Image (cartoon, helix red, strand yellow):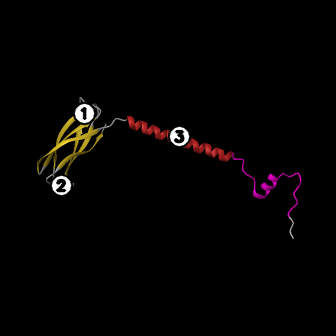
């Protein structure tokens, strides 16, 4: 029969457990890693908030389709409103579509500085076949 080693009377049970299972680290390195991780996450959160704030207050351009008129099988006239900062230049892409929603014409229109923020523009888009509609696909600021 094998006997367990005798326990010294003055040795506390925590020392015996530490000898058997190993000593716990003091947690200093773990706390440092946690603080560094929290710092990195806080910095990333602040960066995201700054990016959102800059994007919210950046000047933008909006367009609104007013109407279209199919001139003939080779063109369609598109009328639209553009709202942008008056001193900025924008480029709007106009599109002519067929009955099957296929693109039959495309035109980029540059709208330079104007006296007002909102202007109404009418442009004629050349088409490769009869269009059934004309619209603004997108507008972007260029400068």
Q: Which mark is residue 43?
A: 3
Query: Is 56 situated left or right of 23 in this image?
Result: left
Front residue (pair 141, 6): 6
Q: Which residue is mark 2?
A: 99
Q: Is residue 122 above or below residue 6?
A: above
Residue 63 point in image, percent of width and height: 26, 40
Relative to 49, 40 lies left or right: right
Which image quadrant: the C terminus? top left
Q: Earlier in the sequence, mark 3 or mark 2?
A: 3
Could you classify mark 1 by the number of other residues whose Cα lies within 10 Å: few (under 14), some (14-19), or many (20 or more)? some
- Residue 16 counted in the magenta span: yes
**Extent of the magenta region:** 4-27
- Residue 128: x %, y % from top left: 15, 53
State which quarter of the image contains the N terminus.
Answer: bottom right
Residue 40 placed where, x, y %?
55, 43
In the structure shown, which secondary structural element does the residue marked by tag 2 occupy? loop
What secondary structure characterizes most of the magenta part?
loop
């Amino acid at each position: 029969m094998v006997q367990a080693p005798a326990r010294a009377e003055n040795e506390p049970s925590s020392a015996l457990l530490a000898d058997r299972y190993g000593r716990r680290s003091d947690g200093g390195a773990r706390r440092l890693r946690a603080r560094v991780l929290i710092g990195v996450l806080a910095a990333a959160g602040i960066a995201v908030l700054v990016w959102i704030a800059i994007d919210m207050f950046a000047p933008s351009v909006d367009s609104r389709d007013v109407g279209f008129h199919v001139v003939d099988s080779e063109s369609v006239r598109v009328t639209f409103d553009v709202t942008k900062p008056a001193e900025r230049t924008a480029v709007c892409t106009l599109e002519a579509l067929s009955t099957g929603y296929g693109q039959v014409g495309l035109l980029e229109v540059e709208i330079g500085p104007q006296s007002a923020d909102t202007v109404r523009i009418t442009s004629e888009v050349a088409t490769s076949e009869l269009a059934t509609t004309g619209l603004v696909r997108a507008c972007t600021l260029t400068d």
